[in-house]
Amino acid sequence: MALDQFVSALDSMLQEACASLLEVQSSEALEQLRVRYTGAKSGALKSVQKMLGSIDVKDKPAAGKKFNEVRDSIEAALADASQRLGVGSSKQASGVSFDPTLPGLRPRLGTIHPITQTLEHLKEIMGRLGFNVTEGPEIEDQWHNFVALNIPEDHPARDPLDNFYLATAKSALPRSSGSNQVPEACLLRSQTSTVQIRVMETQPLPLRIISLGRVYRPDAPDATHFPMFHQMEGLWVDRNVTMAQLKSVLRLFATSYLGGDVSIRFRPSFFPFTEPSVEVDYWWNGQWVEFGGAGMVDPNVFHSVGIDPEAWSGFAFGLGVERLCMRRFGITDIRDLYRSDVRFLSQFAT
Ligand code: PHE
């Protein structure tokens, strides 16, 4: 195509466009003109631009320049017409350009943390087995974390190296209490068994509760340890509760949570607050894995909360929630749960 032909095509287009834009009376008509001249698919400018390809190489720079001039003039005429008709005046005033044809920004949706999902799931299963959910504080006194659970003063479980004791401000003590009276240190609870005591102290029998929450132990973090983790505590106190019921409840729970017919094993163990005591193992990936501890409530514990052990019996258990969660989601490093990395966490969207 010859250059002068190209130029005259552009000129007549410009003339026609300017004439129509000067006369345009409505924003709808203006929009039609905008599409007719500058539309991305079949606007007039677009079709002329296509002709650029057939221009002689030596004329290309001049043709390109002319094209740009005409395009700018048409855009200026469009802007004038918009202003005259008051179209998009607010956008011009604020200087923000808004292109309604751009795709929208998708709001980022969060996901529920796998541990939270697990806690909800556990509550749901235990609820079907008749267990009510209760809660207890994470900052505990020594009575609930140790004494009432039959853990005496000199027991290694109370060692400051194994617990997060909280500094107690001496200045908080009233002066009259004497200089050598040290206030009892509170601690971050090291087990959810504390809630057993709180519930038995305050609620009428019989009792069938679970309590889920955080516990704290000063362990160095590795693939299976973290200084904060979650436990699910269970307590059933009634007239004739037996070890057989304990085993059925834990087996039914495991079958519902892990799916299929899960094998469960009790190994003799020791906890100060249960007698007899067992470690609870589930068969997982060709081996026995420990999920927690359990046993029949020790008569000393009943005594400390004023329950007659001749008239009542009960069982208690405490399972590690992280373990259950990791087992279900195929997570192999507990630390991944607490790195707050959305790339990891968003994989467990429900
Ligand atoms: N509290 C024990 C622990 O943290 C678990 C447990 C709970 C054992 C209840 C027996 C009964 O290891």
Image (cartoon, rainbow, N blue to C red):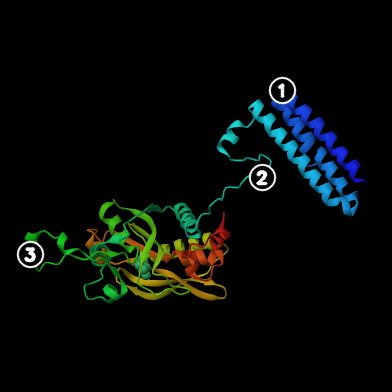
Secondary structure under tag 3 reads loop
Residue named by callout 3? 178
- Disc 3 vs disc 2: which is toward the camera? 2
Asked which quadrant contains residue 250, the reply is: bottom left
First in sequence: mark 1 vs mark 2: 1
Residue under the image location 33 percent in, 63 percent down:
193
Residue under the image location 65 percent in, 30 percent down:
83
Q: Name the amino acid type tagged 2.
A: Pro
Asked which quadrant contains residue 162, the reply is: bottom left
Residue named by callout 1? 25
Q: Name the amino acid type tagged 3.
A: Gly
First in sequence: mark 1 vs mark 3: 1
State if disc 2 and disc 1 touch (CB < 8 Å). Answer: no
Q: Where is residue 37 in the image (x, y as percent from the top left)?
A: 79, 36
* 110 to the left or right of 77: left
Q: Name the amino acid type tagged 1.
A: Gln
Residue named by callout 2? 103
Q: Where is residue 350 in the image (x, y as percent from the top left)?
A: 57, 54
- Disc 1 vs disc 2: which is toward the camera? 1
For the residues labelled 1 and 2, the Cα–Cα distance comes to 30 Å
* 42 to the left or right of 157: right
Q: Position of residue 12 (x, y in %)?
A: 85, 34
Secondary structure under tag 2 reads loop
Q: Position of residue 343 (x, y in %)?
A: 56, 61
Split into quadrants, the picture shows ligand 1 in the one at: bottom left
Secondary structure under tag 1 reads loop
